[in-house]
Image (cartoon, rainbow, N blue to C red):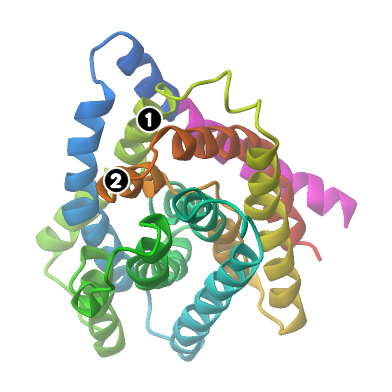
């Protein structure tokens, strides 16, 4: 068992390191002014609105329709909801004496992981097409909670929840398109499938390069100076994923689904925390510090937790 743990730890650690090396290119590009954070923000729109949806739809088209995968699809959605509900429950118990805008940032950071731009490509690297398949369910649920609880918290309770945004967003639309294609066993002509696969392949490197530009603009003195950030890192990187890992074990979730959902649950804080903070007139420095610290620590915590999930 210990040898299996070490073997899985090495596999996941190598994939995490590869992704962060790619992020290092973005870091270098920003510092040398070749491709700066402002460029990255524009590229996020391309990623979120075109490349990520194509990647998700491609995962459903590429997945073989079997009773196991059909059942797994429903389970993945259910467990993704449970993971986010756990995050909401834990976050609501913390920072209640802080100003609403500040506590809202902490609550958002605790609840939402970097599911689309780190966990999804990592799941693909570790367990292949099934990784994207199950992680796509997590991304869809992420959007539901982000457009409700998320914006309510990060705006200090001022933003109204727009029910339309729950469905009319690229992540949800891509899943709504992808599920029927998967269930009906639709197969595209070879040239279209190849086109989608090539576009989907852009998601991982482009997302990590953009992430690197955001990381380059963190205040590295502050990310290790505040005790509150360490507390949120513990909740986001250890308590929530370990709890869900045990839940997965308890109900008998195994294989690619367990690994993919554990990766999604154990990822660092969502990079859009700072973007939403800016959009709703909240502080942008604190979210950057939170994302920065959890990203650094996740290089260690993610491989360990994912390796544990595959052997317990």
Front residue of this view, candidates 274 and 129: 274
Q: Quick one: label 1, few (<14), some, or many (20+) residues within 10 Å?
A: many
**Relative to residue 36, is residue 207 depicted above or below?**
below
Secondary structure found at label 1: helix
Number of other residues with Cα within 10 Å of mark 2, as a class: few under 14, some 14 to 19, many 20 or more: few
Q: Residue furthest right?
A: 2
Q: Which residue is mark 2?
A: 281
- Marker disc for residue 283: none
- The answer to which of 75 and 186 lies nearer the viewer is 75
Q: Which image quadrant: the C terminus?
A: bottom right
Q: How many marks?
A: 2
Judge left or right: residue 89 versus residue 204. right
Q: Residue at x 23, y 81 (%)?
A: 181
Membership of 210 in magenta stretch = no
Query: In the displayed structure, does residue 16 sit left or right of residue 307?
Result: left
Q: Nearer the viewer, mark 2 or mark 1?
A: 2
User: Residue 4: within the magenta?
Assistant: yes
Vertical position of residue 252 compared to residue 238: above or below: below
- Residue drawn 46% across and 40% down? 287
Q: Quadrant of residue 94?
A: bottom right
Q: Main secondary structure of the magenta part?
A: helix
């Amino acid at each position: 068992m210990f040898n299996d743990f070490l073997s899985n730890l090495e596999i996941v650690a190598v994939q995490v390191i590869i992704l962060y090396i790619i992020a290092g290119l973005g870091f270098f590009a920003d510092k040398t002014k070749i491709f700066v954070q402002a460029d990255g923000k524009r590229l996020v729109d391309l990623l979120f609105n075109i490349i990520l949806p194509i990647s998700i739809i491609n995962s459903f088209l590429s997945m073989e329709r079997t009773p196991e995968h059909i059942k797994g699809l429903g389970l993945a959605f259910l467990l993704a909801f449970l993971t986010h509900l756990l995050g909401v429950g834990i976050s609501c118990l913390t920072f209640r004496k802080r100003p609403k805008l500040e506590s809202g940032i902490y609550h958002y950071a605790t609840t939402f992981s970097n599911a689309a731009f780190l966990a999804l490509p990592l799941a693909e690297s570790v367990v292949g097409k099934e990784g994207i398949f199950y992680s796509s369910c997590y991304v869809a649920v992420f959007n539901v909670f982000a457009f409700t609880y998320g914006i309510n918290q990060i705006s200090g309770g001022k933003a109204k929840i727009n029910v339309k945004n729950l469905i009319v967003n690229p992540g949800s639309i891509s899943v709504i398109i992808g599920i029927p294609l998967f269930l009906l066993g639709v197969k595209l002509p070879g040239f279209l499938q190849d086109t989608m696969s090539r576009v989907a392949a852009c998601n991982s490197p482009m997302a990590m390069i953009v992430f690197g530009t955001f990381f380059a603009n963190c205040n590295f003195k502050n990310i290790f100076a505040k005790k509150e950030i360490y507390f949120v890192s513990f909740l986001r990187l250890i308590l929530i994923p370990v709890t869900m890992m045990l839940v997965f074990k308890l109900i008998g979730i195994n294989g690619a689904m367990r690994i993919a959902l554990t990766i999604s649950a154990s990822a660092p804080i969502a990079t859009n925390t700072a973007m939403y903070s800016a959009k709703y007139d909240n502080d942008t420095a604190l979210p950057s510090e939170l994302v920065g610290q959890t990203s650094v620590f996740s290089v260690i915590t993610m491989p360990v937790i994912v390796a544990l999930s595959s052997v317990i």
